[in-house]
Image (cartoon, coloured by chain):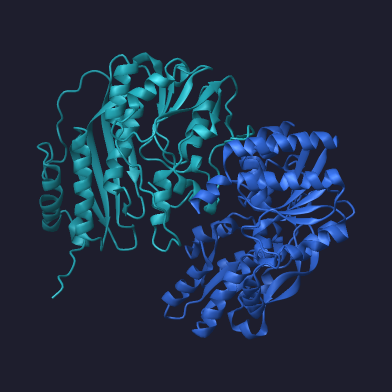
Amino acid sequence: MKGVLTRFSDPDLGRSVLAEIQGKAEAIGRPLTFMEVCGTHTAAYSFTGLRDVLDDAVRLRSGPGCPVCVTPPGDIDRMIALAGGDHITCTFGDMMDVPGSGSSLRKERARSGRVRIIYSPDEALQLARGHHDGETVVLLSVGFETTAPAVSSVLRRAAAEDRTNLRVFSAHRLLLPALRVLLCDPEVNLDGLILPGHVAAVLGRAAFEFVGAEAGIPAVVAGFEVIDLLCALDCLLDMVGRGEVAVKNRYGRAVREMGNPAARGVTSRVFEQCDVQWRGLGTVRGGGLRLREEFAAFDAAPLVPDDEVGDADPPEQCRCGDILRGQAEPGDCRLFARICNPLRPSGPCMVSREGACSTYYRHHREESLHG
Amino acid sequence: MVEEPELVEMAHGDGGRATRELIDGLFMPAFEEEHLSASDDAAPIAELSGEWMVSTDTFVVSPSEFPGGDVGKLAVCGTVNDLAACGARPVFLTAGFVLEEGLSLQLLRRVVRSMASTASADGVRLVAADTKVVGRGSGDGVYINTTGLGQTMPGVELDAARIVPGDRIIATGYVGDHGMAVLTHREGFPFSVPVTSDCASLWPAVETMLSDAGDAVKFMRDPTRGGIATALKEIAEQVPVDVILKEEDIPVRDPVRSAADMLGLDPLYLANEGNLLIVVHEDAGERVVSSLRSRRGVTAPRVIGEVVEGSGAVRAVTSLGGTRDLGLFAGDPLPRIC
């Protein structure tokens, strides 16, 4: 496996593919705008320096593919309210600093010492097992089609053990319906889409066919190594050059035509689709997951003191919503790096390592401020 | 019959018989120091002449033992390397221990022995020590504070003000080993990474290098928390100059790179405990690297970048020729790594 991955990050190969790409972009003769939908791609295109190298010819815009960033303020406040309650709360590290209306999970941890960072949903089940006195463990669950199968699998095991002191607060979002909403927006003007490799590994390439049909732009499923990132651009430039509109797969070692039916199966036994708020996109029909009736005993939502938490507005002047739709770049926001920074984030795109603002703050701060 | 493990009890901190037993039975045999006396409140040390430097640091790493080291070794190396980075030969050390009730005495013995052998390898002498015990739950195992006194090497002038455009930046070893080793060795961490901490004293290597290169060495930093990126950013802002790193030249072990990738971390921000950043005159880069090669604790000495005119930015040039800024570490510092 190491050999394979080394090939996909080979610097000499990378430089030669890059030269080809630059040639193709020049031949097309007009500046192009592609969107990388996935936050991991946003971070990777910056980390490898590709965003910087290509800037004149190919403008890469971030999309709504960071689950922390798209979680709306109301859900954040609900999670913080849960963390302030009389139970153990666990969450993935990226959620800790997302600012709510009055607090954050990190502040709640400092206050109560009962908020834990976990790396896998399995750890939440282990915590619940460790609390024989029945103390409740709440998993704040955030993520796309990729994370839901692991959470589902944990919940099925919890159900088999009748371990109802484990509860899940589902802030899960489904990327596919949101992408549809985004592409229907007349203000969104793109020449091509770089599709999220991880989500596609679950859904399959075929699930994205609608991009070509409905939005009329080429799209490519991409992996995350340097060569993957380059090949995706190369493929898009070829299609743009030929005027071809298709959805291609350049991450064949992980993504199959029909994806991973077993992963989708386990999710659909535990969760069902529902309409939810997305930051930046408003209500997305079928854009979220809630627990099925059979798993109601594991739902943490009823534990939220509902009278205290409404649907808060996003912070004033914060442009996370526009940034998530590719309508603005972090440097366009007046708060960016002046008031909003990773230590004191105004909005979630500055918090998650895969958020556009955090990525630009770390890797392109000077040019974003002055460019 | 299984023997009950011996544990630290509150009585070990009462200053009476149990404290005496702990000191005489566990600490004194490890350190074999004539200066250490269980009964005196302060220790005399030989007359100090010339210029001395003092450095203090507290070590709270969790877990107390990790691949490649333990909190005892770390407590010596950390302070020794801080002195070494200032060009001072570490000579004397004091140590303060905070022990949690319930700590295994066996573990404490291992930590103390490791501390003693690390110190004696560099000829560093423990001249004063203290122990306190806190109730179970009020601490986590063992915390150690060390203070080091070091004698400045004659003829060496390490000063950030000497840094000018053209100077080369050298790293003495693989980047991020300590941070990754400790992070992934924690209880409950979902996968293991074949990497050990780089925790090591770099004084012998620094001493040889300073004798060989003398004036060409302008400044050094010990890039612990925040990694090499944060340390370089601090240097760049202090002078101020810009620093350009060539990413391909920065030594990162494959498992560290892969695991960092998976966890969304940048190895350049991971902690090191046996690495030094050395700023040298532009003609001296390769000479200093050769002098460092195959010295104890030096794992991969390389020129990783250079100083250019500017106002405090640090940039990495990637293999594709693009650049990315490296700012001060901001965000969630990994839980206790040193």
- Left or right? Give the position of A36 relative to A104: right
In the image as oriented, which residue stretches furthest toward the right? A186
Residue B271 percent across, percent down from the top left: 43, 42
Q: Quadrant of residue A339?
A: top right
Residue A242 appears left or right of A2: right
Expressed as whole percent of the image width and height from the top left, the position of residue A265 reads 65, 76
* The chain in blue: A
Name the residue: 39% across, 31% down: B172
**Residue A338 appears anywhere in the view:** no
The cyan one among the chains is B
Which residue is found at the position 75% from the left and 65% from the top? A206
Residue ID at (62%, 72%) = A263
Indicate the quadrant where residue B288 lies.
top left
- How many marks on residues? 0
Residue A273 higher or lower than B256, as above or below: below
Closest to the observer, A312 or A192: A192
Vertically, is A17 above or below A345?
Answer: above
Instruction: Examine the rendered structure and indicate whether residue A22 appears above or below residue A303.
Output: above
